[in-house]
Image: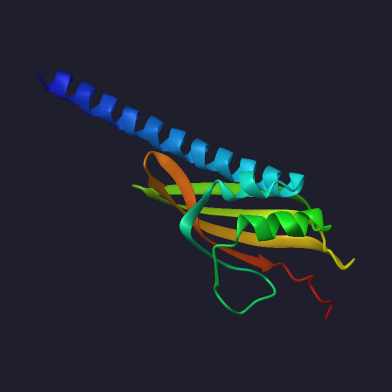
């Protein structure tokens, strides 16, 4: 009987471990698809993974910004805003129906007015699972400053 209980506990733990790994993989895949949509200039696909109450802190703003409008983003893309980002050190930690994602973004942004910004950005986001779908509810992006020689 003790062996049966031990095997049952091990099977339950294995199941929970596999579920957590699958959820982490789903969130990573969503984040990578979202980044690819940004790189492709596809606002509708990019916004597909944003929760209706999404908010964000971006590098050039000290204010919390609410969920951007899909049409505004697409207009920015159409007028020349272009992203070429890759993700590294992409990690996901699931806590029930919430998850924290951290990553490094590296690449270039071309703005409509001709400005170009190249570098690395630290990315942290919070995701929630609603109706069996993982959505990004908050994002914070900070540019990594170049080290200054002493």
Task: State the residue in front, 37 or 122.
Answer: 37
Image coords of residue 121 (percent x, y): 70, 62
Image coords of residue 110 (percent x, y): 84, 60
Locate the N terminus by quadrant: top left
Whether residue 88 sits left or right of residue 94 in the image: it is right
Whether residue 139 sits left or right of residue 133 in the image: it is right
Residue at left offset 68%, top offset 71%? 59
Residue at left offset 12%, top offset 22%? 2
Q: In this view, does 129 lie above or below 100?
A: above
How many callouts does the rendering have?
Answer: 0
Task: State the residue in front, 60 or 2.
Answer: 60
Task: State the residue in front, 48 or 57.
Answer: 48
Q: Is residue 53 above or below residue 2?
A: below
Locate the C terminus by quadrant: bottom right
Q: Which colour scheme is used?
A: rainbow
Q: In which quarter of the image is residue 67?
A: bottom right
Residue at left offset 59%, top offset 62%? 68
Residue at left offset 65%, top offset 61%? 122
Farthest-out residue, right? 114
Farthest-out residue, left? 1
Q: Is residue 32 above or below residue 65?
A: above
Image coords of residue 74 (percent x, y): 71, 54
Image coords of residue 55 (percent x, y): 52, 65
Whether residue 126 sits left or right of residue 146 in the image: it is left
Whether residue 4 sits left or right of residue 93 in the image: it is left
Q: Is residue 107 above or below residue 16?
A: below
């Amino acid at each position: 009987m003790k062996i049966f209980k031990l095997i049952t506990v091990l099977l339950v733990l294995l199941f929970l471990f596999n579920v957590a790994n699958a959820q982490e993989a789903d969130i990573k895949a969503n984040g990578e698809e979202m980044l690819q949509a940004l790189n492709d200039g596809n606002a509708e696909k990019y916004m597909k993974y944003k929760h209706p109450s999404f908010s964000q802190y971006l590098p050039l703003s000290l204010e919390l910004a609410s969920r951007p409008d899909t049409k505004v983003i697409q207009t920015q893309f159409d007028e020349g805003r272009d992203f070429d980002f890759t993700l590294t050190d992409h990690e996901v930690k699931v806590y029930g129906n919430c998850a924290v994602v951290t990553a490094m973004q590296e690449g270039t942004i071309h703005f409509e007015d001709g400005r170009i910004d190249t570098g690395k950005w630290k990315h942290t986001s919070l995701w929630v699972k609603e109706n069996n779908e993982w959505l990004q509810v908050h994002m914070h992006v900070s540019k990594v400053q170049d080290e200054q020689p002493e």
